[in-house]
Amino acid sequence: MNLSPHFSLTELVASQVATRKGIDNTPAPAIVANLTRLASLLEQVRALVGAPITISSGYRSPALNRAVGGAASSAHVLGLAADISTNKLAPKALALLIRQSGMVFDQLIYEGTWVHIALSAGAPRRQVLTAKFASGGVSYVAGIV
């Protein structure tokens, strides 16, 4: 099932962890509606970059989100977030390009080897962060650094 010209439902729910651990990652219809909104945002990113976008993590069922150590309030659980990359740009350059594009998003996080982009159910915050990984944990600083 295609959610947009370049993104399918299968692509947005694929998870090696879910497959390996036997976790059902099938989204409910309301989540599919959110994933359709997310696919539209990803189309904007693809057009901005001028190249395909790879999704390393999209929708996560609550069980899958727990299995990967995701935050309980993660937008991934609502089908409103994706971790992305592209062969055309380094992740930091991708994050900077999205930030300065004027694109409407709720959250953009440069995570080192990928970029997290999310929508919200309410008004978008346009929050831009960089993840810092240390001592087995993660902290966030404002901006792309």
Image (tube, rainbow, N blue to C red):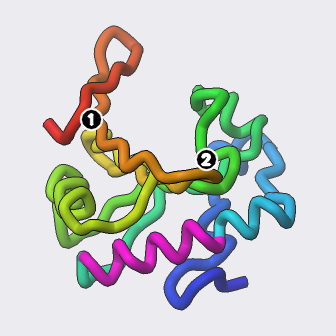
43 in magenta: yes
145 in magenta: no
Residue 15 seen by the camera: no
* Circle number at residue 76: 2
* Residue depicted at 47% across the width and 62% down the height: 55
Q: Quadrant of residue 105?
A: bottom left
113 versus 98 height, above or below: above
**Where does the image place residue 109, in percent across and percent down from the top left?**
34, 43
Q: Residues within 10 Å of mark 1 (few under 14, many from 20)?
A: many
**Where does the image place residue 116, in percent across and percent down from the top left?**
41, 49
Amino acid type shown at disc 1: Thr
The alpha-carbon separation of the residues under discs 2 and 1 comes to 18 Å
Q: Quadrant of residue 111?
A: top left
Q: Please report the bounds of the magenta region as a residue range.
A: 36-48
Residue at mark 1 = 130
Marks 2 and 1 close (CB-CB < 8 Å)? no
